[in-house]
Image (cartoon, rainbow, N blue to C red):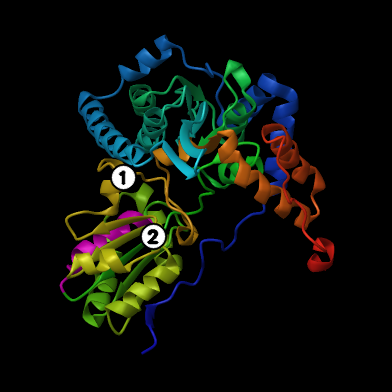
Amino acid sequence: MAIEYLKKATLTSTSGATDVHEQVKAMLDDIEAGGDAKALDYAARLDGYEGPVLLSQADIDAAIALVPEKIKADIRFSHANVKRFAEAQKATLANVEVEIVPGMVAGQKTIPVNAAGCYVPGGRYSHIASAIMTVTTAHVAGCKHIVACSPPRPGVGVAPAIVYAAHYCGAHKILAMGGVQGVAAMTFGLFGLPEANILVGPGNQYVAEAKRILFGRVGIDMIAGPTDSLILADRTADPMVIAADLVGQAEHGYNSPVWLVTDDRHIAEEVMRIVPGLIDDLPEVNRDNAAMAWRDYAEVIVCADREEMAATSDAYAPEHLTVQAEDLDWWLDRLTCYGSLFLGEETTVAFGDKASGTNHVLPTGRAATYTGGLSVHKYMKIVTWQRSTREGARPIAEATARIARFEGMEGHARTADIRLAKFFPDEVFDLTVDDCHDQQS
């Protein structure tokens, strides 16, 4: 049976995308050439902000004083969970040493990058959780310099709760600057900051494009597009819970896709009936985004069975994947393409977004087919090393010389020859390959 769409999206997450590449490239070039002054000029024009760019301890203390104690406690709770999970992830990386052949030892070593730039969105919503997710993981990784960068609001500055979260989670500096200019400041080491080795965190299309252009010069976590979420549900699922979860993710933005995949037509139809009422009940600031996302980007799909549901989900490779179905262990074993997986109605995407410990900076736009989300590992370089005795080097050098000559790389071969001649001066080695160039052709 072919899958059936009870609701088909009229648009995709890339529909109507503006080509911002040239605009962002020009800004980056302008800021790199103009330095601090040019970045401040962009901040004044685009952020509408002329306050302190690097927050002093007094600025941080003043912001912290404005944060309600209950929210501070919640931030500390979320930080503890994210930190605990990040520490467990870091423990899966180990320095390794193995004897390849007698006398030749090779190894793996993990080294944190020196400087991390963490971008924290602060436009329509104050993304407190993004500060927790990005700064905490960088801190656990062992980065020596962590900058948290967030757009300031005119006359206010960075949202106080973001300042508290970034400071509490371990940011060494907090930069009140948004968009391309903020990304540029971290990359180019403006305002006395160290040049970032990696840029992480979500942002708008301008932030995403800046990271795309700068990738290679710096590392990045990923290039994030509109957030997306998929729910797999069978006959045992609760339509009201499904509908609430879809609406909760649709409020992210007008172009945030949400998808329901089920093998039960009644569930599908009931969810479609409930969703509009839940959207109408949202506050106005959230309602418009959710309504447009549901109208233009949402899909409801009916499949024949759970295997077809799983295959459909893997094809969509959602950023967030929720399973509300029987036999959760089967789904955990079967599903292969997702940014983060939420098993059972006892958990939900919002838990992962805010406080449960797993990271919410995740791959969008089917990037989950080849990568996972932000983790402590993103800040770690896995490097290799080797050491050898002279006897251990002997077979390696012989093989290297012959392979290199066969490839036509005589200079490489001679670096092996010289060692064999030095280490074993009384021996003769056959380091040639007969008719090697004829064999290659």
Residue 266 shown left or right of residue 258 in the figure: left
| Percent of width and height locating residue 116 | 50, 30
Secondary structure of the magenta portion, mostly? helix
Which mark, by number, is residue 358? 1
Give the Cα distance between marks 2 and 1: 13 Å
Query: Could you tell me which quadrant the C terminus lies in?
Result: bottom right
| Percent of width and height locating residue 111 | 48, 31
Furthest-front residue in view?
A: 426
| Percent of width and height locating residue 244 | 25, 59
At horizontal 36% and vertical 50% (from top left) the residue drawn is 286
Which mark, by number, is residue 212? none
Q: Which residues are magenta?
A: 236-250
Furthest-top residue in view?
A: 58
Let me know if residue 249 is in the magenta part: yes
Q: Amino acid at mark 2?
A: Tyr
Q: Vertical placement of 183 versus 287: above or below?
A: above
At horizontal 75% and vertical 26% (from top left) the residue drawn is 33
Label 1 residue SS: loop
